Structure formats: structure tokens, C-alpha cells
Amino acid sequence: MTDVHFQRMKDLPSTHLLGAGTAMCAGCGGLEMIKEVYDVLGENTVFVNAAGCMTLLSVYPFTPFRGSWLYTAMASSPAGAQGVRDALDILKANGRMTEEEDLEVVVLSGDGSASGMGLSATSGAIDRGLDFIYLCYDNEGYGNTGQQTSPESPHGARTATDAVGPGNIGYKKDLFSIWVANKPAYAATVVGAEPLDLARKIEKAHELEGPRLILSLAPCPTGWGYDPAHTVEIGRLAVKTGVWPLKEYVDGKVVHTRHPGKRTPVEAYLETQDRFRHLFEPVRNDKVIAEIQARVDAYWAEVDVDDGTKA
Amino acid sequence: MYRIRFHGRGGQGMKTASRVLGSAFFHEGFEVQDAPRYGAERRGAPMNAYVRADRAPIYERGIILRPDLVIVADDTLVPIPAAGVLQGLDNRSVLLIDSATPEDEWRKRTNIGGPILVLPLPDTVDRSSLAMIGIACAGAAARLIGVISEDALEQAVRDELAPLGEAVVEKNIQAAMAGYAAMSDHAGTVSEGVPAAASGAGSPDWVDVPVEEVRLSGPAIHAGATSVEVRTGLWRTFRPVIHYDRCNHCNWVCSSFCPDNAISVAEDGRPVIDYDHCKGCMICVVQCPPHAIESVLEVEAAAAERRGSA
């Protein structure tokens, strides 16, 4: 058990563990989230990094972390986490490491790896009941290589591979539900723009054992097309419009930690980003905007506004 | 063959500038190559883009090592070795810098022999709109080269930027023409370099490095947060400045939301910005509840700092 409890904004740390000087874009929503998560997990954390934007976090001899970082291929980070976890367990069993020195093993991966090519390795890790946290920064595309469409790109968004016409014709994959269907120890969605909600969930996840998912929306100024200054506003709008539900799965049920009774229309979120501009200019595309709104409405229609549970 | 290299920071429109210049050459009947070149870093980080143009087919490939013209959209890049701004300049290469520092000062600093020009942009070009600087540089380059007409330049801007809408295109044409006009006294300063031939290539200046044990050449790092040695503050084009008379010492807002951990809270509760690492995203400016943080153009803030310390 940690002795930190996040009741109010003032309870959030005012000094931070993550080192400055990383190569991430100015205004990176993913980096903002990792900084907040690292403060709660603490120094006794080892990151197993799937190839992606965050590849550039640790480039020898520079690292923003206070401890170890292991780099893996895009599809195999849960396998890397298994190896690290096993090694730590052996050290503990041999008496070469105390319980206090133990490390939290955290996979750090983008959505392309988490929901696409790395999903098979994740599935195996869940099957084996691996004791790890899977931390996904979801910037809704293959951001590192120029924002190509990923399984998490939203419907209608223009990407490098859907640069013209209607944008992405597919729909965002529901990674949270894929995990929940397999009854993990814990699963939650977060966003860096809601640091208190995030801190509470990371604290909860940290106290549990087994496969745990932290799925974070990671607003991306470079890939989504907006001024980097607006990363937090856009994250908040994703919550207020209901596009990014904040929820957790614990004790066998899904509970929403925010359930906006009166949601802001989705277009307030869409119109902030160049990737959706074609829905508004030169001619407004009411059909697609209405479809996106209808899908969000249908999601929230199943959420109990009183206790936040989902049918 | 003309070999032109544009240097800027990610987000300053240098890739677009190289495309526009390439298209303008094409409209004048040239064979053209243009390509951007990025490092592993991102928006705000040094990048370059290059253009080759010739009346004959171009067989050269790869980065330009011996440029005829180098354009620098951000003068803070010149002293950064990794940016490679001065790489391969000789006595006939032209260096064009968008800078408030005069030419003779750049001559002293760089110690290069070729022509150095400073781009005097009229006030009509919106300098706070970074992409406008890039397009103005493309216009200036076109005039310096001397074989590109205004019509070809305008058509190139239309070709490259048409998907962004007519208003954006017009604004860019205006900026491109401002750059073109600014260089009227220097039209045709840039001359063509000779095509490279494999037969004339000398042996590379290789340095033999003795093989070292791994523990010497790649020692294990036993320190945490070594990334602070990387000064990402150089990426900044705008600087957040805290007005402490308006700061209500709320502790967490600017510091919590800064993605780069570049704002720490001092013991007295005052937030302090670490300008060695702040990339200038301006999230703190937007989020500060009492609006106590102001966004200032980096060049102006740095100039004010120099005046203050002098």
C-alpha cells in the first residue's frame, strides 16, 4: 500500500520524477501522461517499451527515467515484461532482492502496438496472468512514423494514409472491452488533462497484482493538427463530449469515474483538430458529424447516470 | 546544377518551402529533386530540406554536401553542430539568414568566405506565423537563384498549397513575393555548381578509430534522468514568461500539465520555468488560472535578456 492518497488537486506532487530533455514533440499529450503516471508509481518501476513514439524517450546515454528501461520490438513488449518479471521473481526467491526492492513492471506502448500488431503478445500475457501494468498512450494513429491510420484511429479522421476523401472509414477499436472481457486484475482509461482522476487510478492499479491496463488518450499536436498549447483543453473536451469515457474495471464491473450528465456536442471536440476539418470546411458534413454524435450517444445511453455503471 | 539546402525547425514550413522552390524550378523547365530530411526529433527540432535542379537529368542522390545556397529560417540553428548549417559551404556558396543580427556580425561568427545575406522581411509578413517565414524564404531563394520568374513562383505556391484553401494560398503568395522582392538587389547571386562525377571523387577523410572494449566505448550508465543533459530549450520559438505579481501560487496547474517537467515549484510556492528544457508548447500559458503567464517571441525575449545583463 502506498501512503499517498489523492483527494484534491493540492495532493498532486509539485515535484516530478521524469527527467526533462526528451525528444518528444512540444505539447506531447503522451509524455504529459507518462510524467503524471511516473510520479505515482515512483522510482521502483521498470519500463518495457514497445517501438513507437516513446522509442525516443531513452536514447543512450540519455534517459528521463530514474531506473531501467528495456526496449522491445513493436509486437513483443508483454513478452519482454514476462522476462523481466520472471527475473525479478527469481532474484526474490534466491534472497538476492527484498520485497521492498521489487520493481513494478510496466509495458509502455502506443495504440498501434497495443491494439494492432502487439495484441497477440498481450493476449498471451493475460492468459498467463502476468503481473504487470500495460500503459498505452493512445494517439489514435502510428504517430512516430507520421500518423498513419491505426486500429485506434477514429471514424472520419484524416491520417497520412487516409489523407483525402472521407478520412478513416473504419471505427476505433475498443481495447478496454477486449481486456475487460478477459477479467484482468484492473483496467482503466485516463487522460493527462485529468491528473487527479489519473492519479487515483494509477494508485489503485499499483496496489493490485496481475494483468492491469491503463489506457490513456494522448492528444497529439503533430498528428491531429492543432497548436501544442491546446493539448490539455482538447483532452478535457474529449471527456466533456463523452468521446473519451473515463472509467475503470474493478471487482468484476465497469464503473465510470466521470459521467457527464449534460454532454458537450462532439463537434466542439472535432472542430479543434485539422484531422476533422474536412467535416466542417468547405462544406459542413452533417451526416458524418451526426453519425459520430449518435455513436457517442448510444454508448452513454447504457451508462447509469447515478452510479456510473454500464449495462 | 543548383543545390539548395533549407535549414529550419520542425513546424517552420521548410519542407513546404523546398517543395515550392522545387515546383517553381519545374515550371521553368528544370528537372528537380526535393526532399526533407529529419533527425529522430520532432516539431521544434532542427531539420533541413534540400532541392536539386538542373536542365539535364539529375543522377545525384542523397543529402547535399556542397550547397550553392543555404537558407536558414532560424538563426539560433547556426551554432548547433547537429543542425549542420555551415556544412560544405565554400567561397562561392551563398548563405541567407533570416535574422535580426547584421551581415558583418555573421561574417565574424561563421568565418566563411562566400556571400552572406540577411533577409530583410517587410512588416507585412506575419512573423508570429512560422510557416510564413518558410514561404518567404522560398521566395527569397527563387530571386537569389535568378532563373525563376514571379509567375513560376506564384504557380508553385498554388500547386503545393491548393488543398489548404484560397485564403491560405493568397496569404502565402503574398509572403513568397515579399521574400522575392526583398532580394531584388541580389538577383542571380547564386551560381550553379558543377555536377559531381565519381571519377573525380577523392578518397574519404576517414579517421581510423581503434576498437575499444564495450565497457569503454559504451559504458553502462548508472545515473537516473540523464536526459536533462539534452537542452531542448533550443527548440523554442516562443517563450512562456511568468508574471509573479499575478501568479496565485496554486502549485500544481502549470507544473502538473507541463509535459516536459520544465516547471518546478520552489519552496516558497513559486513556479519556476527551466528555460534550458522548455520546448515552448505554451500549455502553461493556456492553463494558468489567473493568466499570469505570457507568451513572448523567443528572439525578443533573448534580446531583452541580453540588454538586461549588459
Image (tube, rainbow, N blue to C red):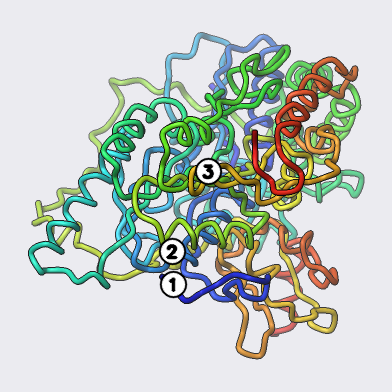
Q: Nearer the viewer, residue B73 or A295?
A: A295
Callout 3: chain: A
Residue beneath the point at 64% across and 73% down: B273
Can residue B95 be seen here? The reply is no
Answer above or below: position of B174 versus B282.
above
Answer above or below: position of A101 versus B146.
below
Sequence-wise, the earlier of marks 3 and 1 is 1
Element marked by disc 1: loop
Provide the residue designation for mark 3.
Answer: A215
Can residue A25 be seen here? The reply is yes
Residue beneath the point at 67% across and 54% down: A193
Q: Mark 1 is on which residue type?
A: Thr
Quarter of image, res A189 = top right
Crowd rating for badge 3 (residues with CA inside 10 Å; few <14, some 14–19, many 20+): many
Provide the residue designation for mark 1.
Answer: A2
Which mark identifies residue A41? 2
* Labels 3 & 1 near each other (Cβ < 8 A): no
